[in-house]
Amino acid sequence: MYSNEIYYEIISQQNKSIYVVIDLLDWAEEKVAELQGLVTGGSLSLSGDSSIRRTCSLDMTLQEDYDAITSAKNLISINKKIRLRIGVENNLEKYKHLGEKVWFNLGIFILTSCSLSTNLESTTLSLQAQDKMVLLTGDVGGVIPGMLEVNKTYDEDNNFQYQTIEEIIRYAVVGLGGENPAKVIINDIPEYIKAPMIYHDSQGRTLTLLDWRVVPKGTPGSVTYKTGDYIGYAMEKFYYTGELIKQPGDTVASILDDIKHFLGNYEYFYDVDGNFVFQEVKNYLNTSFTNLEELTNKDYIANFDKTPFVFTFRDKHIVNAYTNNPNWLNIKNDFIVWGMADEQKGPIMYHLVVDDKPILPENYTKPWQQYLIDERKPTNQGDANYNPYWGELSSKFPQIYDSKKEEWITGPSGFTYYFDMIDTKGDYGEFSVGAIGKRTKTIIDDKVGLMYPPVVPNMVIINTEMDEIEKNKLIAELNRTGQNFVLLSKNPEATGSPQVSFDVFTQAPYSKDAFSVIREQLYQHTNFNESITINCLPLYFLNTNERIEVFHESSNIYGDYMIKSINLPLSPESLMSITAIRAQQRI
C-alpha cells in the first residue's frame, strides 16, 4: 500500500491512458477470467449511509464474442461475481517500480442485471451490479424462511443459553447468509462488558465495608452503602438479552440492523475486498462526567478525536467546481430531554439553553437559578428584564433546592430536574436565543432514567463460583489491562472467608442519562451540518466515511469534511463528484 499522494501524482498525469477490467469470479471469489474492452458509459456510486455501499452500472464494448448469458456454463452468468478494477498508465520515472499500470480495486459485486447485444461490428455488455450486501438484504439472498429466535440456543432439555453479540453477527452472516467465515471482520465488540453493580437489601439495611469485609458502621477507613449505591462492576458476557425473533420473509440484514440499533454507534458494510465488516463508527465521544458544582460551558462540548485525513484538496488543477450548502434549519439553542426515573421518582427533565447567564450580586449566595426566581420575576415581554424561564424554574427548581435553608435537597444523582445555561460568551454564543431567537429541540425517551452518568467505583467483582476456565481467562485479561478486581464468594461462611458475600450485590438496571443525551443533541445541532460538493479529477483511492481536508477561499470552504457519497463515472474524461459534510473539530 502506497500513500495517496503518490497515487494522486500518477492519476494527475497530463497524458495517460485509463483501463477498466472486469474480473469474473466464481462463487468462492476465485478469478476465472477477465473482460477488457472500451467503456462507453456507466458509473460507480458509493454511499456511506447505506449498508449497500457500492452500486455499479457499466457499458463495455468487448474484444471478443460470448455465448448466451442465460447459460450458467458461460463465463458471464448468474453464478459469477465480478471485481471491478481501474488501471492508470504510469509514465512517471520515479514510480516505475509500481509497474506500467497502477491498479485500483473498486470492489466485488453481485450481478443484478446483465445484457449482451451483438451486431456485425462488435459485442456490447451492459450490466448492473451491487456489492455483496444484496446477499443479506433480500434483494438477491438473505431471506429468512421461517420463524427464528436468533439470540438463543436450546439444548435437548429445552434449556436456553443467550448468544453473545459477536456470535449473533457471525451466525447471521455466515450461518444464514452463507459468507465465508474467513471474510467476516468484527471489530470493537468486546467479549465481556463491565456491568455496574449496586448494593441491594430488601429490608433497607446499610452495608459497611473495609477491604471487602463487613465491619461496624463508623470503622475508620470504611465505606457505608445503602440500597441502590454503586459498588463496582461485574464482567458479563456481552449478550443480546432482549427479544430477537424473526418471522418468515425477514432478512439477515434486519438482524444486523437490530444489533446496530442495540449497540447505538456502529455500522456494517462490505469493503472493496469483499470482506464483511461490523465496527464502531469512529467519532470517539468523550463521556466523562464533571461534578455539578464544577460544570462549565466546555463540559457540554462533545469532544471528538481528529482522525487522520486521507487527502487534502488544495490543487486547483484537479478540482473543477465546489458547492457549499449550509443547513440553517439544523441550528437549535434550547434543548429539553424528558425521561422516566422510576415509579417513585416519576419523570425527569433536563433543560439546557444557550442564553445570557445572570451575573450574581456580590453577596448573593444562592445558585443563579434561584436568582432568576427571586430577582427576575416576569414583567412585560418587551421589558429588558423579561424572564421567560420564571414559570418553569419557580415550579420545578424547588424540587432539588431549598431556598430557605439555602441547601440542595439531594445530590446530582438524585435529581429529577435540572436547568442550565451555556453563556453567550462561550463557544456557542453566536447561536444564542438573543442572537437568533429560541429554537427548541425536545427529546422524549423512556430509556432515559438518570440525570447524569453514574459514578461507579472502578473495581471489578468476580464470583469465585463461576466456571473455572472462564474465571482464569477473565483474571488473566484483567491483569493484562491493569484493572483492579476482587474475588468474592456467594457463600463465604462455607469457605471461611471473612469477606462479604457476592450475593448482596445485583446488576444495576440499564438507563441512559439525560446529560449525555442533551450533550449529543448540542453537538448535532450547533453546526450548520454543511454539505459540500466537489467535482474533480477521479481519485480512485477515496472511499466513503473518510476524512478529507478542503481549502477553497472563494467558496468559503475550508477545514475537515467526512465523505458521505461518491459518484465516479467510468466513461473516459469524466469528473468525479464527492459529497461531504463538515466534520466536528476537536475543541
Image (cartoon, grey):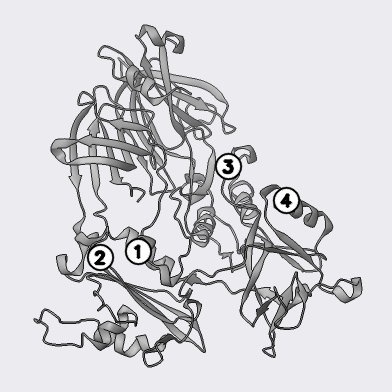
SS type, badge 4: helix
Q: Earlier in the sequence, mark 1 or mark 2?
A: 2
Q: Is residue 250 visible?
A: no
Asked if the residue under mark 2 is in contact with the one under mark 1, i.e. CB atoms within 8 Å, the reply is yes
Q: Is 485 located above or below residue 587 in the figure?
A: below
Q: Earlier in the sequence, mark 3 or mark 2?
A: 3
Q: Is residue 105 visible?
A: yes
Taking 202 as reference, is 280 left or right?
A: left
Q: Alpha carbon of mark 1 to alpha carbon of mark 2: how far?
A: 9 Å
* Residue at the extreme bottom: 404
Asked if the residue under mark 4 is in contact with the one under mark 1, i.e. CB atoms within 8 Å, the reply is no
Q: Which residue is mark 2?
A: 332
Q: Which residue is mark 3?
A: 185
Q: Earlier in the sequence, mark 1 or mark 3?
A: 3
Q: Alpha carbon of mark 1 to alpha carbon of mark 3: how far?
A: 31 Å
Q: Residues within 10 Å of mark 1 (few under 14, many from 20)?
A: many
Q: Nearer the viewer, mark 2 or mark 4?
A: 4
The disc labelled 1 sits on which kind of residue? Answer: Gln
Place of residue 22 in the rendered image (x, y in percent of width and height, measured from the top left): 43, 24
Q: Earlier in the sequence, mark 1 or mark 4?
A: 4
Q: Which residue is mark 4?
A: 479
Q: Which residue is mark 1?
A: 521
Q: Alpha carbon of mark 4 to alpha carbon of mark 3: how far?
A: 27 Å
Q: Nearer the viewer, mark 1 or mark 3?
A: 1
Q: Residues within 10 Å of mark 2 (few under 14, many from 20)?
A: many
SS type, badge 2: loop
Taking 401 as reference, is 378 left or right?
A: left
The disc labelled 4 sits on which kind of residue? Answer: Asn
The disc labelled 3 sits on which kind of residue? Answer: Ile
